[in-house]
Image (spheres, helix red, strand yellow):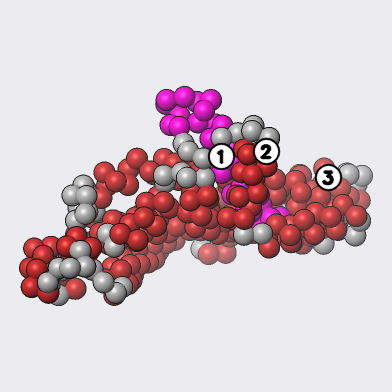
Amino acid sequence: MALRIAQKLGVFALSLIGASILIFWITNALPGNVAHVLLGTDATEAAVAELEAQLGLDRPIFLRYLEWIGGILTGDFGTSPLSKDPVLTLIAPRIGITAWLVVLGIIGSVIIALPLGMVAALRQRQWQGFVISAAAQLGMAIPVFWGGIIFALVFAVWLRLLPPNGYVPLTEDPVQWLRHLILPVVTLAMVQSAVLIRYVRSAFIEVLNEDYYRTARAIGWTPLRAMLRHGVRNAAISLVTVLGLQLSSSLVGAIVVEKVYNLHGLGSLLLDKVAERDLVVVQGTVMLLVLAVLLINLLVDLSYGIIDPRQRGERQ
Protein backbone atom coordinates (compact mmCIF):
# COMPACT_ATOMS: atom_id res chain seq x y z
CA MET A 1 0.00 0.00 0.00
CA ALA A 2 2.84 2.37 0.88
CA LEU A 3 4.54 1.63 -2.44
CA ARG A 4 1.33 2.35 -4.33
CA ILE A 5 0.92 5.70 -2.55
CA ALA A 6 4.55 6.58 -3.32
CA GLN A 7 3.99 5.74 -7.00
CA LYS A 8 0.88 7.91 -7.16
CA LEU A 9 2.67 10.79 -5.47
CA GLY A 10 5.49 10.45 -7.99
CA VAL A 11 3.06 10.60 -10.91
CA PHE A 12 1.38 13.61 -9.26
CA ALA A 13 4.70 15.45 -8.93
CA LEU A 14 5.71 14.72 -12.54
CA SER A 15 2.28 15.80 -13.79
CA LEU A 16 2.56 19.03 -11.83
CA ILE A 17 6.01 19.77 -13.28
CA GLY A 18 4.81 19.03 -16.81
CA ALA A 19 1.74 21.22 -16.34
CA SER A 20 3.85 24.11 -15.00
CA ILE A 21 6.11 23.97 -18.08
CA LEU A 22 3.12 24.02 -20.43
CA ILE A 23 1.41 26.85 -18.54
CA PHE A 24 4.53 29.03 -18.55
CA TRP A 25 5.37 28.30 -22.19
CA ILE A 26 1.83 28.87 -23.52
CA THR A 27 1.25 32.12 -21.62
CA ASN A 28 4.58 33.49 -22.82
CA ALA A 29 3.89 32.38 -26.39
CA LEU A 30 0.75 34.52 -26.59
CA PRO A 31 1.07 37.57 -28.88
CA GLY A 32 1.73 40.95 -27.27
CA ASN A 33 3.22 41.66 -23.85
CA VAL A 34 2.49 43.58 -20.70
CA ALA A 35 5.01 46.31 -21.59
CA HIS A 36 2.78 47.49 -24.42
CA VAL A 37 -0.22 47.46 -22.07
CA LEU A 38 1.58 49.56 -19.47
CA LEU A 39 3.02 52.10 -21.89
CA GLY A 40 0.10 52.30 -24.32
CA THR A 41 -0.06 52.14 -28.09
CA ASP A 42 1.94 55.35 -28.60
CA ALA A 43 5.07 54.06 -26.83
CA THR A 44 8.31 53.89 -28.80
CA GLU A 45 10.17 50.64 -29.34
CA ALA A 46 13.02 51.92 -27.18
CA ALA A 47 10.68 52.61 -24.26
CA VAL A 48 9.08 49.19 -24.63
CA ALA A 49 12.49 47.48 -24.72
CA GLU A 50 13.59 49.40 -21.61
CA LEU A 51 10.48 48.38 -19.67
CA GLU A 52 10.85 44.77 -20.80
CA ALA A 53 14.40 44.82 -19.40
CA GLN A 54 13.12 46.23 -16.10
CA LEU A 55 10.47 43.49 -15.90
CA GLY A 56 12.98 40.81 -16.85
CA LEU A 57 11.13 39.88 -20.05
CA ASP A 58 14.32 40.09 -22.12
CA ARG A 59 15.92 37.15 -20.31
CA PRO A 60 15.81 33.58 -21.70
CA ILE A 61 12.47 31.88 -21.07
CA PHE A 62 14.16 28.95 -19.32
CA LEU A 63 15.68 31.20 -16.66
CA ARG A 64 12.38 33.00 -16.15
CA TYR A 65 10.62 29.65 -15.74
CA LEU A 66 13.10 28.49 -13.11
CA GLU A 67 12.65 31.74 -11.19
CA TRP A 68 8.85 31.44 -11.41
CA ILE A 69 8.63 27.79 -10.34
CA GLY A 70 11.17 28.39 -7.58
CA GLY A 71 9.03 31.21 -6.23
CA ILE A 72 5.91 29.00 -6.29
CA LEU A 73 7.71 26.31 -4.28
CA THR A 74 8.39 28.93 -1.60
CA GLY A 75 4.85 30.34 -1.72
CA ASP A 76 5.69 33.34 -3.90
CA PHE A 77 3.55 33.43 -7.08
CA GLY A 78 5.10 36.70 -8.20
CA THR A 79 3.87 40.29 -8.38
CA SER A 80 1.43 41.76 -10.87
CA PRO A 81 3.24 44.32 -13.06
CA LEU A 82 -0.03 46.21 -13.55
CA SER A 83 -1.36 46.58 -10.00
CA LYS A 84 1.98 45.98 -8.21
CA ASP A 85 0.14 43.59 -5.85
CA PRO A 86 1.41 40.09 -4.99
CA VAL A 87 -0.45 37.46 -6.99
CA LEU A 88 -1.51 35.60 -3.85
CA THR A 89 -3.05 38.81 -2.51
CA LEU A 90 -5.22 39.00 -5.62
CA ILE A 91 -6.09 35.30 -5.60
CA ALA A 92 -6.73 34.69 -1.89
CA PRO A 93 -10.03 36.66 -1.52
CA ARG A 94 -11.48 34.87 -4.55
CA ILE A 95 -10.62 31.28 -3.66
CA GLY A 96 -13.47 31.03 -1.17
CA ILE A 97 -16.09 32.14 -3.71
CA THR A 98 -15.02 29.57 -6.31
CA ALA A 99 -14.57 26.85 -3.68
CA TRP A 100 -18.08 27.35 -2.27
CA LEU A 101 -19.54 27.37 -5.76
CA VAL A 102 -17.78 24.18 -6.88
CA VAL A 103 -18.25 22.20 -3.65
CA LEU A 104 -21.92 23.10 -3.21
CA GLY A 105 -22.53 22.56 -6.93
CA ILE A 106 -21.07 19.05 -6.79
CA ILE A 107 -23.01 18.20 -3.62
CA GLY A 108 -26.19 19.42 -5.30
CA SER A 109 -25.47 17.41 -8.46
CA VAL A 110 -24.95 14.23 -6.41
CA ILE A 111 -28.17 14.81 -4.47
CA ILE A 112 -30.01 15.16 -7.79
CA ALA A 113 -28.22 12.49 -9.84
CA LEU A 114 -27.92 9.60 -7.38
CA PRO A 115 -31.64 8.96 -6.75
CA LEU A 116 -32.68 9.83 -10.31
CA GLY A 117 -29.98 7.63 -11.82
CA MET A 118 -30.98 4.76 -9.56
CA VAL A 119 -34.66 5.13 -10.53
CA ALA A 120 -33.70 5.34 -14.21
CA ALA A 121 -31.83 2.02 -13.86
CA LEU A 122 -34.54 0.24 -11.87
CA ARG A 123 -37.27 1.55 -14.22
CA GLN A 124 -35.25 1.48 -17.45
CA ARG A 125 -38.08 -0.12 -19.44
CA GLN A 126 -40.85 1.99 -17.89
CA TRP A 127 -41.94 5.57 -18.45
CA GLN A 128 -40.04 6.86 -15.40
CA GLY A 129 -36.74 5.67 -16.85
CA PHE A 130 -37.46 7.16 -20.26
CA VAL A 131 -38.43 10.53 -18.78
CA ILE A 132 -35.33 10.75 -16.59
CA SER A 133 -33.02 9.72 -19.44
CA ALA A 134 -34.63 12.23 -21.80
CA ALA A 135 -34.34 15.01 -19.22
CA ALA A 136 -30.66 14.16 -18.68
CA GLN A 137 -30.01 14.29 -22.42
CA LEU A 138 -31.72 17.66 -22.63
CA GLY A 139 -29.72 18.97 -19.67
CA MET A 140 -26.44 17.88 -21.29
CA ALA A 141 -27.34 19.87 -24.40
CA ILE A 142 -27.98 23.12 -22.49
CA PRO A 143 -24.91 25.39 -22.19
CA VAL A 144 -24.05 26.54 -18.67
CA PHE A 145 -24.33 30.24 -19.50
CA TRP A 146 -27.75 29.78 -21.12
CA GLY A 147 -29.05 27.87 -18.10
CA GLY A 148 -27.73 30.61 -15.82
CA ILE A 149 -29.44 33.33 -17.83
CA ILE A 150 -32.77 31.44 -17.75
CA PHE A 151 -32.59 30.86 -13.98
CA ALA A 152 -31.70 34.52 -13.37
CA LEU A 153 -34.51 35.69 -15.63
CA VAL A 154 -37.16 33.52 -13.97
CA PHE A 155 -36.21 33.60 -10.29
CA ALA A 156 -34.51 37.01 -10.03
CA VAL A 157 -36.19 39.21 -12.65
CA TRP A 158 -39.72 37.81 -12.99
CA LEU A 159 -40.40 36.27 -9.57
CA ARG A 160 -37.95 38.49 -7.62
CA LEU A 161 -37.24 35.68 -5.18
CA LEU A 162 -33.44 35.79 -5.29
CA PRO A 163 -30.73 38.37 -6.08
CA PRO A 164 -29.57 38.21 -9.72
CA ASN A 165 -25.87 38.80 -9.04
CA GLY A 166 -23.22 39.70 -6.49
CA TYR A 167 -21.78 37.94 -3.46
CA VAL A 168 -21.89 38.46 0.32
CA PRO A 169 -19.25 36.71 2.49
CA LEU A 170 -20.50 34.06 4.90
CA THR A 171 -18.96 35.83 7.90
CA GLU A 172 -20.73 39.06 6.99
CA ASP A 173 -24.30 37.83 6.59
CA PRO A 174 -25.02 34.05 6.40
CA VAL A 175 -28.57 34.57 5.10
CA GLN A 176 -27.53 36.86 2.26
CA TRP A 177 -24.54 34.61 1.53
CA LEU A 178 -26.94 31.71 0.98
CA ARG A 179 -29.42 33.76 -1.07
CA HIS A 180 -26.69 35.01 -3.42
CA LEU A 181 -25.29 31.50 -3.92
CA ILE A 182 -28.55 29.63 -4.56
CA LEU A 183 -28.91 30.52 -8.24
CA PRO A 184 -25.21 29.98 -9.19
CA VAL A 185 -25.07 26.69 -7.28
CA VAL A 186 -28.35 25.42 -8.76
CA THR A 187 -27.18 26.39 -12.25
CA LEU A 188 -23.92 24.48 -11.87
CA ALA A 189 -25.60 21.53 -10.12
CA MET A 190 -28.29 21.12 -12.77
CA VAL A 191 -25.78 21.04 -15.63
CA GLN A 192 -23.39 18.68 -13.81
CA SER A 193 -26.20 16.38 -12.63
CA ALA A 194 -27.41 15.92 -16.21
CA VAL A 195 -24.05 14.34 -17.08
CA LEU A 196 -23.81 12.44 -13.79
CA ILE A 197 -27.27 10.85 -14.14
CA ARG A 198 -26.15 9.02 -17.28
CA TYR A 199 -23.14 7.51 -15.52
CA VAL A 200 -25.11 6.62 -12.39
CA ARG A 201 -27.74 4.89 -14.52
CA SER A 202 -25.12 2.87 -16.41
CA ALA A 203 -23.33 1.87 -13.20
CA PHE A 204 -26.54 0.62 -11.57
CA ILE A 205 -27.67 -1.22 -14.72
CA GLU A 206 -24.43 -3.21 -14.47
CA VAL A 207 -25.29 -4.04 -10.85
CA LEU A 208 -28.71 -5.34 -11.92
CA ASN A 209 -26.97 -8.06 -13.95
CA GLU A 210 -24.73 -9.24 -11.12
CA ASP A 211 -25.31 -12.49 -9.21
CA TYR A 212 -25.34 -10.85 -5.77
CA TYR A 213 -28.20 -8.58 -6.80
CA ARG A 214 -30.22 -11.47 -8.23
CA THR A 215 -29.58 -13.47 -5.06
CA ALA A 216 -30.85 -10.62 -2.90
CA ARG A 217 -33.97 -10.40 -5.04
CA ALA A 218 -34.45 -14.17 -4.87
CA ILE A 219 -34.58 -14.16 -1.06
CA GLY A 220 -37.37 -11.59 -1.12
CA TRP A 221 -35.67 -8.23 -0.98
CA THR A 222 -37.31 -5.35 -2.87
CA PRO A 223 -35.39 -3.90 -5.83
CA LEU A 224 -34.74 -0.66 -3.93
CA ARG A 225 -33.50 -2.45 -0.80
CA ALA A 226 -31.23 -4.75 -2.82
CA MET A 227 -29.82 -1.78 -4.73
CA LEU A 228 -29.20 0.30 -1.60
CA ARG A 229 -27.66 -2.62 0.29
CA HIS A 230 -25.43 -4.05 -2.44
CA GLY A 231 -25.61 -1.80 -5.46
CA VAL A 232 -24.31 1.50 -4.09
CA ARG A 233 -21.09 0.03 -2.69
CA ASN A 234 -20.34 -2.02 -5.81
CA ALA A 235 -21.10 0.85 -8.16
CA ALA A 236 -19.02 3.26 -6.08
CA ILE A 237 -15.79 2.71 -8.06
CA SER A 238 -17.37 3.93 -11.30
CA LEU A 239 -19.21 6.73 -9.51
CA VAL A 240 -16.13 8.03 -7.72
CA THR A 241 -14.21 8.09 -11.01
CA VAL A 242 -16.96 10.09 -12.70
CA LEU A 243 -17.31 12.35 -9.66
CA GLY A 244 -13.61 13.17 -9.85
CA LEU A 245 -14.02 14.13 -13.50
CA GLN A 246 -17.09 16.18 -12.61
CA LEU A 247 -15.16 18.08 -9.94
CA SER A 248 -12.53 18.97 -12.51
CA SER A 249 -15.10 20.08 -15.08
CA SER A 250 -16.95 22.05 -12.38
CA LEU A 251 -13.92 24.31 -12.07
CA VAL A 252 -14.32 25.16 -15.75
CA GLY A 253 -18.09 25.53 -15.42
CA ALA A 254 -17.61 27.80 -12.42
CA ILE A 255 -15.73 30.30 -14.60
CA VAL A 256 -18.80 30.73 -16.82
CA VAL A 257 -21.24 30.80 -13.89
CA GLU A 258 -19.19 33.47 -12.13
CA LYS A 259 -19.42 35.75 -15.16
CA VAL A 260 -23.18 35.21 -15.53
CA TYR A 261 -23.89 36.06 -11.88
CA ASN A 262 -21.07 38.61 -11.46
CA LEU A 263 -19.26 36.61 -8.78
CA HIS A 264 -15.70 37.80 -8.32
CA GLY A 265 -14.08 34.39 -8.03
CA LEU A 266 -11.03 32.84 -9.66
CA GLY A 267 -12.82 32.52 -12.98
CA SER A 268 -13.59 36.22 -13.21
CA LEU A 269 -10.05 37.08 -12.13
CA LEU A 270 -8.60 34.80 -14.80
CA LEU A 271 -10.71 36.24 -17.61
CA ASP A 272 -10.04 39.84 -16.54
CA LYS A 273 -6.29 39.32 -16.35
CA VAL A 274 -6.17 37.58 -19.72
CA ALA A 275 -7.85 40.64 -21.23
CA GLU A 276 -5.35 42.92 -19.46
CA ARG A 277 -2.35 40.79 -20.51
CA ASP A 278 -1.35 40.42 -16.87
CA LEU A 279 0.35 37.09 -17.50
CA VAL A 280 1.91 36.79 -14.05
CA VAL A 281 -1.53 36.63 -12.47
CA VAL A 282 -2.81 34.36 -15.26
CA GLN A 283 0.03 31.91 -14.69
CA GLY A 284 -0.52 31.83 -10.94
CA THR A 285 -4.29 31.38 -11.24
CA VAL A 286 -4.08 28.62 -13.84
CA MET A 287 -1.36 26.86 -11.85
CA LEU A 288 -3.59 26.91 -8.77
CA LEU A 289 -6.51 25.46 -10.75
CA VAL A 290 -4.30 22.74 -12.23
CA LEU A 291 -3.03 21.89 -8.74
CA ALA A 292 -6.63 21.51 -7.56
CA VAL A 293 -7.49 19.21 -10.50
CA LEU A 294 -4.42 17.02 -9.96
CA LEU A 295 -5.12 16.78 -6.23
CA ILE A 296 -8.69 15.70 -6.96
CA ASN A 297 -7.46 13.00 -9.36
CA LEU A 298 -4.90 11.81 -6.79
CA LEU A 299 -7.51 11.53 -4.05
CA VAL A 300 -9.88 9.69 -6.39
CA ASP A 301 -7.17 7.22 -7.34
CA LEU A 302 -6.19 6.58 -3.72
CA SER A 303 -9.82 6.13 -2.70
CA TYR A 304 -10.24 3.02 -4.89
CA GLY A 305 -8.45 0.83 -2.37
CA ILE A 306 -10.61 2.16 0.46
CA ILE A 307 -13.89 1.65 -1.38
CA ASP A 308 -13.04 -1.78 -2.79
CA PRO A 309 -10.49 -3.79 -0.72
CA ARG A 310 -10.27 -6.33 -3.57
CA GLN A 311 -8.28 -3.81 -5.61
CA ARG A 312 -5.65 -3.59 -2.89
CA GLY A 313 -5.16 -7.32 -3.08
CA GLU A 314 -5.01 -7.32 -6.86
CA ARG A 315 -2.41 -4.56 -6.95
CA GLN A 316 -0.32 -6.24 -4.26
Residue neighbourhood size for the residue with mark 2, other residues' Cα within 10 Å, grouped as few (<14), some (14–19), many (≥20): few
Regarding residue 64, the answer to whether it shows in the image is: no
The residue mark sitting in front, 1 or 3, is: 1
The part of the image, by quadrant, that contains residue 56 is bottom left
Residue type of the residue flagged with mark 2 = Trp
Magenta stretch: dominant secondary structure? helix
Give the alpha-carbon distance from disc 2 to disc 1, as whole Å. 11 Å
Locate residue 144, reporting x and y percent.
59, 56
**Residue 255 - label:** none
Q: What span is in magenta?
A: 168-197
SS type, badge 1: loop
SS type, badge 2: helix
Residue neighbourhood size for the residue with mark 1, other residues' Cα within 10 Å, grouped as few (<14), some (14–19), many (≥20): many
Residue type of the residue flagged with mark 1 = Pro
Residue depicted at 53% across the width and 64% down the height: 315
Give the labeled residue for mark 2: 158
